[in-house]
Image (cartoon, grey):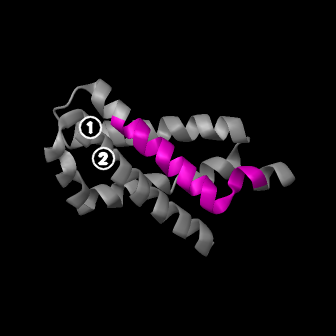
Amino acid sequence: MIRTVFAVLVAGFAGTIVNALAAMLIGGPAKWELMLIPGRYVVACIVAALLPFIFRAMKPTLGVVVAAIALTGIPSLNAKLVLGVGAPWFNVLLLNAVYAAVAMLVYLAITGDLTQRRRR
């Protein structure tokens, strides 16, 4: 349980940092300030908390697909519809796909969920 909570937190933080770095590539160096917004880390960790449920409820391949959609879609909808981010949908989805990929990889590297499921 502690390992899972740790994995979710590290995944949320890592995904958010890499997301901000990717935003700097697209939007320029001024976007580095995205790394300084605490609320982004909170939302990222809350969304990453879906990972244990997704990977335990589904077969590995389907879990990766569902996790990618959820971890890209939920933050994108939040950014556009709740926070009113003015960036085009393509950019928002692309940057949140970066978050999703990094968060999933970090989570799976720490927990080994896919390899554990194969052994069961």
Question: Percent position (x, y) of residue 21?
Answer: 30, 46
Choose between 34 and 60: the one closer to the eye.
34
Residue occupying image coordinates x 17% and y 54%: 33
* Residue 64 relative to residue 16: left or right: right
Residue that numbered label 1 is attached to: 25
CB atoms of marks 2 and 1 within 8 Å? yes
Q: Badge 2 local density, few (<14 within 10 Å), some, or many (20+)?
A: many
Question: Percent position (x, y) of residue 106?
Answer: 54, 55
Where disc 2 sits, the SS reads: helix
**Chief SS of the magenta region:** helix
Question: Percent position (x, y) of residue 99?
Answer: 41, 45
Image quadrant for the C terminus?
Answer: bottom right
Q: CA distance from mark 2 to mark 1?
A: 7 Å
Report the magenta residues as a range.
95-115
Residue that numbered label 2 is attached to: 21
Question: Percent position (x, y) of residue 5?
Answer: 54, 68
Residue 64 position (above or below residue 40): above
Where disc 1 sits, the SS reads: helix
Residue 3 position (above or below residue 77): below
Q: Amino acid at mark 1?
A: Leu
| Residue lying furthest right | 120
* Residue 26 relative to residue 74: left or right: left
